[in-house]
Image (tube, rainbow, N blue to C red):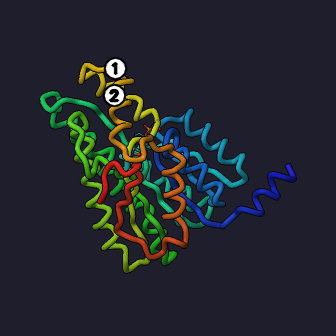
């Protein structure tokens, strides 16, 4: 008990971050990293069991953590999440818009409503979360918004058409937001991972392999060969980039879409 308190005292920064889609994969890794950096957190996911588990892991690192089950496309739920976060901690310093989905469909299988749904979850959710969180950041005179884009916003994969389109939109939206929020001292950047092991990536690799009529091992081998550093990226590496973007060291970085992809796409 004493050691948990000592841990809390030593790392605590009095800063607060909200992370969406934190119940698994990259979002979970970001939550654990920001907790190690001393942030108090609100961790969100649409899946209750997963987010309760992550909240427990975060608390064990010695910071406070509010688990929030909410759908990031639901304006009321998102507004309540930000209100509850502010009521709990008295501030919101960082918003990580990480939640996202990646449907795999061939062109002629994509219905307009499918594509609208994907845009709603991946892109419109960012509008909803940014509007709900930024009002607190604007009052504080400082804030950081960090969005999940993707290498797919630079390089196309045939079976990831809808997804790629949403991630291109996020790149553009990130820049527009950076332009808008500059006068409020709020920075807006995006991380663009390459191939990161996660539930999402497992499902992508399985479905794309099936569509191409190859085994998942064959797909993985070809995908790895296409990366100059010859390896996929661990979720923890994306979390370290987010940790930097969330820190004071990144106060003068805004409007940037940063690739972390082993060199697969170079810009
Ligand atoms: N894994 C990769 O290789 C990779 C590469 C580039 C970009 N990304 C992006 O990084 C982000 C995280 O990816 P991941 O691989 O960890 O995915 P993941 O599927 O493992 O985790 C995403 C989490 O978001 C949650 N979520 C989905 N819809 C939600 C909603 N409406 N409201 C709240 N939560 C919701 C899911 O329940 C899940 O826990 C995504 O935006 C993804 O597009 C991932």
The numbered disc on residue 215 is 1
The answer to whether residue 83 is above or below residue 29 is: below
Residue drawn 55% across the image and 46% down it: 29
Q: Against 199, is 139 above or below? A: below
Seen as rendered, the residue at the extreme bottom is 183
Q: Residue 219 carries which label?
A: 2
Element at label 1? loop
Which numbered dot is residue 156? none
At x 77%, y 63%, the residue is 9
Residue furthest toward the right? 2
Asked where in the image residue 131 lies, by quadrant, the reply is bottom left
**Could you tell me how far apart the alpha carbons at marks 1 and 2 are, in whole angstroms?**
6 Å
| Residue 240 image position (x, y, % from top left) | 54, 55
Say if 158 sits above or below 139 in the image. Answer: above
- With 52 as the anchor, is 18 left or right in this view? left
CB of mark 1 within 8 Å of CB of mark 2? Answer: yes
């Amino acid at each position: 008990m004493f050691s948990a308190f000592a841990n809390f005292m030593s790392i605590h920064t009095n800063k607060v971050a909200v992370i969406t889609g934190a119940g698994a994969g990259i979002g979970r890794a970001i939550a654990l990293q920001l907790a190690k950096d001393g942030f108090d957190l609100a961790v969100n996911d649409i899946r209750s069991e997963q987010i309760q588990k992550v909240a427990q892991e975060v608390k064990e690192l010695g910071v406070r953590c509010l688990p929030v089950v909410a759908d990031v496309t639901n304006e009321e739920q998102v507004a309540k999440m930000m209100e509850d976060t502010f009521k709990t901690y008295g501030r919101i310093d960082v918003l990580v818009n990480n939640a996202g989905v990646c449907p795999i469909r061939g062109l002629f299988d994509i219905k307009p409503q499918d594509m609208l749904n994907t845009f709603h979850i991946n892109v419109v959710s960012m509008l909803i979360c940014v509007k709900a969180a930024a009002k607190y950041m604007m009052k504080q005179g400082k804030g950081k918004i960090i969005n999940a884009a993707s290498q797919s916003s630079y390089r196309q994969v045939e079976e990831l058409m809808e997804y790629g389109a949403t991630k291109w939109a996020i790149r553009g939206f990130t820049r527009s937001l950076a332009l808008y929020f500059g006068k409020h001292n709020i920075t807006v950047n995006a991380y663009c991972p390459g191939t990161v092991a996660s539930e999402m990536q497992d499902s992508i690799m399985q479905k794309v392999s099936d569509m191409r009529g190859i085994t998942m091992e064959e797909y993985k081998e070809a995908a790895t060969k296409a990366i100059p550093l010859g390896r996929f990226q661990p979720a923890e590496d994306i979390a370290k980039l987010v940790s930097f973007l969330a820190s004071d060291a990144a106060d003068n970085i805004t409007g940037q879409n940063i690739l972390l992809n082993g060199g697969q796409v170079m810009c």
